[in-house]
Amino acid sequence: MDGYFITFEGGEGSGKSSILKSAEQKLQNLGYDVLTTREPGGIEIAEKVRDIILDPVHTAMDARTEALLYAAARRQHLTEKILPALKKGKIVLCDRFVDSSLAYQGFARGLGIDEVFSINQFAIQDLMPDLTLFFDIEPKEGLARIKANKDRERNRLDFENIRFHEQVYEAYQLLVSKFPDRIQVMNADQPFAQVETDTVKYIDSYLKKIK
Ligand code: TMP
């Protein structure tokens, strides 16, 4: 594969989605051929699965069903969009990927990180990100940011209690220690412009080092 696959991870209100959008522009200005996308979603089929998973009305959804739907959306997204872009040599920036399933479904929902990894392995067939940036902010700070942002869509997982979001945070810390070579921690508890600068600088130096 000629391209590079970079994923952005973090809890609610970590700012990763806005950072991803602005990083795309800044990296393009530096001459990189960048494609941005998101999970769950990124293509029509997976966006439809996203609507089903995140609809606040679907309170009856079983945790395993949730995990399988995320994995199904991921599979389609990977084959239809991510892999073709990597084959063309693009830098793919993806808002969330398999680590989200490990943190949210594996740990916070209690299904088990290894178990959730194994259903995802069926979907991804060893295609792990080259680099993952974890946008680190305490859950209560992230949730306060969400509350303050009236324009943000509210999804089913936003309605989980603080304990759930603390478990997601704890899971990310576990993943950081499990995959220290792949996951880089970014301090997200700073002004937007600073996080944006840190992110672009980190990706640029990573790509220069690895190319
Ligand atoms: P977003 O708010 O970053 O767009 O993500 C949508 C929600 O889906 C968010 O609450 C995290 C959750 N999620 C999972 O629980 N598992 C996954 O595998 C993914 C990709 C997202």
Image (cartoon, helix red, strand yellow):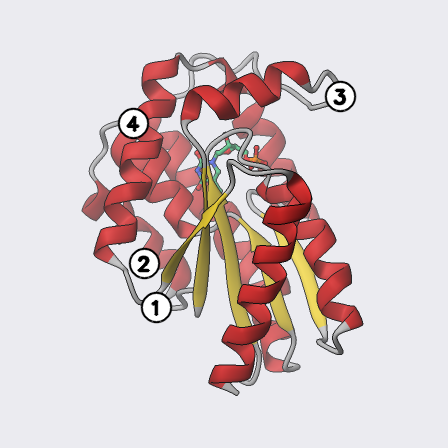
Q: Is 123 placed left or right of 148 in the picture?
A: left
What separation in Å lies between label 1 and label 4 (alpha carbons)? 26 Å
Residue type at tag 1 = Asp
> Residue 193 or 26: which is nearer the viewer?
193
Q: Secondary structure at mark 4?
A: helix
Q: Position of residue 163 (x, y in %)?
A: 32, 16
Question: Which of disc 4 and disc 1 is earlier in sequence?
Answer: 1
Q: Is mark 4 within 8 Å of ligand 1?
A: no
Q: Which residue is mark 1?
A: 126
Mark 3 or mark 2, which has the lower sequence index? 2
Alpha carbons under labels 4 and 2: distance apart: 23 Å
Q: Distance between the Cα atoms at labels 4 and 3?
A: 26 Å
Looking at marks 1 and 2 on the same chain, the residue that comes earlier in the sequence is marked by 2
Residue that badge 3 annotates: 151
Q: Residue 121, which numbered label?
A: 2
Amino acid of disc 2: Gln
Q: Are marks 3 and 2 in contact (CB under 8 Å)?
A: no
Q: Which residue is mark 4?
A: 167
Q: Amino acid at mark 4?
A: Gln
Residue ID at (59%, 65%): 201
- Find the distance from the CA under tag 3 to the CA under tag 2: 35 Å
Q: Secondary structure at mark 2?
A: helix
- For disc 4, the neighbor class at 10 Å (few under 14, some 14 to 19, many from 20) is some
Q: Position of residue 90 (x, y in %)?
A: 65, 75
> In the picture, residue 52 is in which quadrant?
top right
Dot label at residue 76: none
What residue is rendered at 53% in x and 35% in y? 14
Amino acid type shown at disc 3 = Asp
Few, some or many residues within 10 Å of mark 1 (<14, 14–19, 20+): few
Q: Could you say whether the residue bearing mark 1 is in a helix, strand or loop?
A: loop
